Each structure stands twice: as structure tokens, then as C-alpha cells.
Amino acid sequence: MDSTTTAHPPFALIESVRNRPGDDPIFSLNAEASARAAAGESILNATLGALMDDTGQLCVMPSVAEAITRVPIQRAAAYAPILGPPAYLKAVIADVFGDGPLAAQATAAATAGGTGAILHAITTFLDAGQALLTSDYFWAPYRIIASHTRRAVETFRMFDAEGRFDLRAFEEALLGQIARQGRVLAVLNVPCHNPTGYTLDESEWNELERVLARHAGRAPIAVLFDIAYAKFGHEETGAWVRHLAALAEHVQVLVAWSASKAFAQYGARVGALIALQRDDEERTRIRNALSFACRGTWSNCNHLGMLAVTDLLTVPEHRAASERERAALVELLAQRVEAFNAEAARYDLHYPRYEGGFFVAVFTPDAPATAAHMRELGVYVVPLGGAVRVALCSTPVAEIPRLVQALAAGVAAAGAGAEA
Ligand SMILES: Cc1ncc(COP(=O)(O)O)c(C=O)c1O
């Protein structure tokens, strides 16, 4: 038989993944910005979610590098326990909840970054075919993880007419899900929401508590708090942790913890999913389900990274060094937030209350048109539905006037286009 004329054998890729997009839109924009900069253009790239210093270098924490070098090679080379090293899990729980009575109700599993924690929450607290509930502005990978695991995403309107967190819309969506799917997994990225920068204030937390308490008896409800940016919040841990404790009386509280931003260590993929549960048997069942999920996903996580982070969380002088270094990074970002708010006040820009965090979202009638106009000015932001996401984390403070001017021009151009 002449092999050159043989028909190609049937392709093996399954139908549901045949048309997956080949690249992440944010990484594509970043690649375009980098190519133009390499060709000599003056480019301001506010797309990527990593903290850069004012010279454009990735911010790193020396204490983290030192902790990594202190880990004995034989320990790092060995497999980690499937659920994660017990000292690591204890340290992560204590990082969020302290080591008081609340920590005694917590169980945790090591995950590949916060992303892995979100994955485990979705596959452990939702059945296939069901949808998680999150705000209509959300971190796009939520949908990718849900779709990859044959779940879906449903959203509620994030901001009401006054620009506050729309807890009525949340309540309606919650009731809809209880009626339709008989369970809820809500995912709330607080504090310092990506992509809007929003942080719930005290009255919003109280209302969230009331809403969840009101409906807690109707169906199993889990709420995953994605705290990826928590250490960069206006006011650190304390305040919102108290609310999690109160919420745990009514619903299954879950926390996606990540070392990526907290230790400026994105590449080590260190994270954890924490669950608060005061019923001992249910806590054991959750622990077992998570352990099984770990074994069935990645077997076990990066031992070197987890040992280094344990050292940084538990050895007082190492912890103090990392806290000092982090404080400098928080301050770097705070200066940008302040400069952004001051500069934006000079223009007619609309954006949610912004007190800290890596991003802010600026509302626009036509996000693709705004982003395209800004690209012509050499400024890169990420278009979302109804807004563009601005990564202050990668914008040098001296470039903020240029950034804000380009935003104002981009929003105005989109407005003019929409009216035409
Ligand atoms: C909202 C949000 N959640 C979770 C993550 C998870 O990050 P990682 O998997 O690196 O911990 C990110 C990272 O960008 C994020 O923006």
C-alpha cells in the first residue's frame, strides 16, 4: 500500500476539548506589549498580576530565598505527605486563624497555589454539572477550572447603583441556586478583589453574615474565601477573620490560601485549602476527601516550597524578616494606590472604592474599544465586560499620570464610539 495516500487515522482528541483557546488573553497582551517594548517603543504594560518594582523588575523577598537555601536537600528531595507536611498545614492555619479555638476546628490540604485550592473546593463541594456562584467581575480562571472539571460559573451583579457590594443580588442568586441545584458554593475573592480592587467594609461584612445566616438551613452552603491578596489589604487580617469565624456558625467556610503574592513567590506553587468545621466527623470526612483529591490530582505538592514557607511562618526571626520585607512591598503598592486615586480625581473616571491590592478596574461603556485606544498610546490594560483592569502592581509610580491620562482618553474614545 502507498503510505503517502493513506487517509489520516481518526484524531483522538475528545470532542469537548477540541476547540479550547490556545493562549490566555492576558499572556497574549503581555507578549504583544513586550514585543513592542523590545522594538524600542515606550510601552506601559499594566496587564500582568505580579508585583514589579519601579524599575520593572519582579519584586522578590530575600528572606524567602534564604529559607529555600536552608532546607536540607534530602528533605526537599523526598515526597511530601499527600495532604501536606503537618507542620506546614498547622502554620498556614495559624497564619489565617491564629492558634486559638478556631484553629482547632480547621483542617487543611496542601495545594498547588491558590489555584489548586480553588480546584479542590470546586470538585469537593460541587457535583459535576453544577455551578459555583461568584460576582460578575471575577478572576477568569474560575471559569476555566469549573469548565475543566465539568462544572460552571454563575454570577450575581457585584455593584449596586451606589457602587457598593450588591448583597441583594447575591441573596437572590443564592436563593436561585438553592432552588435549582440544592447546594451552593459561593466564591468571594476578598479582600482586594481581582480584578476590581474592592474590599468589603464592615457593614458589607455584617450584611453578608445576615444573608448567609438567613438561608443557612435551606441547603448545604459553602463559601470559599479566596484570600490570594489578603496581605496587601488596607487593614491586614484581623477584621475580616472575625467575620469568617461568625460565618462558620452558619455555612461551610473555606479559605484558599496562597504563598504566591504573600511571599512574592509565584513559581514555587505553594498554597492550601482550609476548611472550618466544628463537627469532628464531618471535619474528618472533609480531610479524607481532600487527601483523596490531592492524590488524584498531583499526588503531593512542592516539598521544598512548603518546607521553606513553614520555616518563614514558624521561626520567629525568619517570620519577622519576611514581615519586614513584605511591609516594604505593601508600602510600594500603597504609594501607587494613593497616586492613582489622586491622579484619577482630576478626570471623570469611575471605579470602585480602591484602598489597596494589585488591581483596580475602571468602568467604561466599551472595554475592548478603551483598551484598543490605550494600546495606540502604548498603554496596555486588560479589557473585561464593562471595565478595564489596571495592574497597579506592575506600574511604576512615575508612570501613573501617563496611565491615568490614557485611561481617561480610552474611556472618552469608547464613550464617543458608543454615542456615534
Ligand atoms: C483572584 C486570584 N485568586 C487566586 C490566585 C491564585 O494564584 P496562585 O495559584 O499563584 O496562588 C490568583 C492569582 O493571580 C488570583 O488573582
Image (cartoon, rainbow, N blue to C red):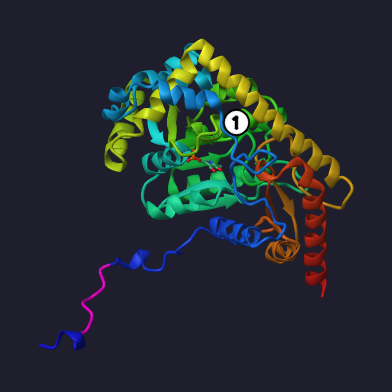
Crowd around label 1: few <14 · some 14–19 · many ≥20 (10 Å): many
Q: Is residue 107 visible?
A: no
Q: Residue furthest right?
A: 346
Query: Which quadrant of the rendered structure holds the C terminus?
Result: bottom right
Where residue 21 appears, as percent x and y from the top left, is: 46, 64
Question: Which residue is depicted at the point 78% across and 70% down?
Answer: 418
Residue 377 showing in the rendered view: yes
Q: Give the residue drawn at x 30%, y 34%.
A: 300
Q: Please report the bounds of the magenta region as a residue range.
A: 7-12
Majority secondary structure in the magenta region: loop
Furthest-left residue in view? 1
Q: Which residue is mark 1?
A: 230
Q: Is residue 411 left or right of residue 65?
A: right
Quarter of the figure with the N terminus = bottom left
Tag count: 1
- The stretch drawn in magenta includes residue 10: yes
As displayed, is residue 50 above or below residue 137?
above
Quarter location, residue 3:
bottom left
Above or below for 204 versus 344: above
Q: Residue 394: image x %, image y %?
A: 66, 44
* Image vertical order of residue 82 relative to residue 354, above or below: above
**Left or right of 274 in this view: 160:** right
**Is ligand 1 less than 8 Å from the beta carbon at label 1?**
no
* Displayed quadrant of residue 330: top right
Instruction: Name the amino acid type tagged 1.
Output: Ala
Q: Indicate whether 5 appears above or below 354.
A: below
Residue 14's spot in the image, x, y percent? 30, 66
Image location (x, y in percent) of residue 312: 48, 20
Residue 197 within the segment the image draws in magenta = no
